[in-house]
Image: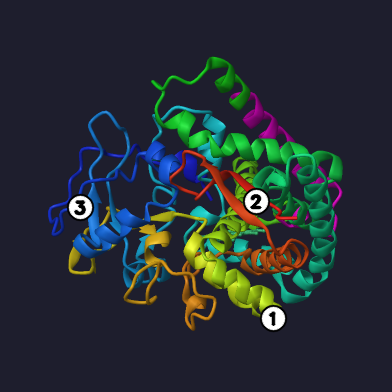
Amino acid sequence: MQALSNTIQAEDNSYRPPHINYQAPKGFDLMDIKAFEAVGQPHEYFHKLREAAPVSWWQPPETVDVAGFWSLTRYEDVKKCDLNAKDFSSQEGGILMGYSEKSSGPKKLRAAALDSLINMDQPFHIPLRMAHRPFFTPDFVAELQLRVQAEVDRLLDNIEAKAAKNDGKVDMVTNFSEWLPLFTLCEMLGIDKKDRPKIVRWMHYLEMAQYITSDPDQNISPLFVAKFLWNIRQMFKFGRKILADRRKNPRNDLLTVIATAEVDGAPLDETYLDGSWLLIIFAGNDTTRNSLSGTMRLLTQFPEQKQMLLDEPALMSKLVPEALRMVSPVMYMRRTAKVEAEFSGQKVMPGEKVVMWYGAANRDPEVFDNPDQMDIHRANAGDHLAFGTGPHVCLGQRIAIMQLETAYKQILDRFPNISWTGNQRHAPSNFVHAISHLEVDLGQ
Ligand code: HEM
């Protein structure tokens, strides 16, 4: 299979669809990552969009070298698109908006963002996905949970000690949320303990990648750019080294699966090894991390829901889907239409890009009554689309749910008065709902 990054065409920013039914309301630019940094998920704007322009066209300015796209904000439209991988390709242009062969940033990072499972269509996608399966079965997850429980305890001990020196307050992200998913993923991948802190550092830089590469004229310090480039280089160097080692010395771990997987009858070449490495460390880390922090915020915003959980801990399994619905850690996936299609009365033509906004779908009042209210008794919370749906549905969802449930149980058991202090920061990204700082008071 030819590397997708070698086949990709420059995106045409001048294209305008022949039919545009709805006029998007003003007030928020879905490509402005600084606007996402300010508000996190733009729920108010999503509500306006869903009502006034459920399928709206974003036209790039002449200076921005990316394709325009349709934004889907209704639940049924997002689901219809995600389920139909035959007519809505992940491979033609990839799942990220704003990919351009002319865009700035490290070449290897741009190529790796394309050359992986998540950007594949059939016939390549399913066999590669299947190869990963042994590390996502219920039995494997149950065994892993024992190790996760012990790690949660250890992290909570550290948090308690830190908070004791700071008036009970501590940053949830850097002391808990970024470490638990890293631990779990590294246990699956078979990465030694001494190498794990490096991955946390690379995650920080990856989260800033969109900011650094989207606008070369920004006033970013050259030192920061140099550090970014160095870290990205180190990340790929490490990935190649460890995957090469697994080819020579296979073990019973997920890295060996990736290193020895075949696509189109051949082992993954170096570009696909880079891409697979990038996908697994990003997908397995940043998503669960932001769910953990986002849920601590929700439990403070909806204290009566927290009280219900404290009164009846058996309700914890209901917290996970409802919190995922409300947080929606992955904001979107992009597709390219291969055929003429229609969403909410809007015609979409072959070749046009379609962006599925999961956070908007998850708060569609047509499906979720009173969607901005957290309700752990919500009967259909499990219908959320935070993990996507269809053939690309999150491969790690069982792992994620297990970690979230384990963490919430142990956190509330140990710190029933934990609350968010109101201090938080988001990273500038419209791809992940990236909470980079969230201060909590342990309430002890
Ligand atoms: C709360 C945590 C998580 C969320 C919200 C999340 C969300 C998503 C979403 C939205 C997709 C794309 C689905 C689609 O296109 O329909 C996806 C794909 C994927 N996720 Fe997750 N994810 C999470 C955790 C994880 C974890 C822990 C792992 C690995 C250990 C993981 C591995 C993957 C992989 C490999 C894919 C690509 C699957 C494919 O293309 O076939 N994710 N995830």
Q: Residue 314 bears which disc, if any? A: 1
Give the spatial CA distance, label 3 vs label 1.
43 Å
Q: Which residues are magenta?
A: 229-257
- Going from N to C along the chain, the mark reached first, 3 or 1, is 3
| Residue 111 x, y percent position in the rendering | 52, 38
Residue 253 is one of the magenta-drawn residues: yes
Q: Look at 79% across and 43% down and name the residue there.
A: 162
Q: SS at mark 3?
A: loop
Q: CA distance from mark 3 to mark 2?
A: 33 Å
Separation of residues labelled 1 and 2 (CA atoms): 27 Å
Q: Is residue 284 above or below residue 59?
A: below
Residue hosting label 2 = 285
Q: Are marks 1 and 2 in contact (CB under 8 Å)?
A: no
- Label 2 sits on a secondary structure element that is helix
Mark 2 residue type: Asn
Q: Residues within 10 Å of mark 1 (few under 14, many from 20)?
A: few
- Color encoding of the figure: rainbow
Image mark for residue 190: none
What residue sits 41% from the left and 32% below the top?
214
Residue 333 lies in magenta, yes or no?
no
Mark 3, other Cα within 10 Å: few <14 / some 14–19 / many ≥20: some
**Label 3 sits on residue:** 24
* Element under disc 1: helix
**Quadrant where the C terminus lies?**
bottom right
User: In the figure, is residue 393 to the left or right of 162?
Assistant: left
Q: Amino acid at mark 1?
A: Ala
Q: Residue 129 vs residue 140: left or right?
A: left
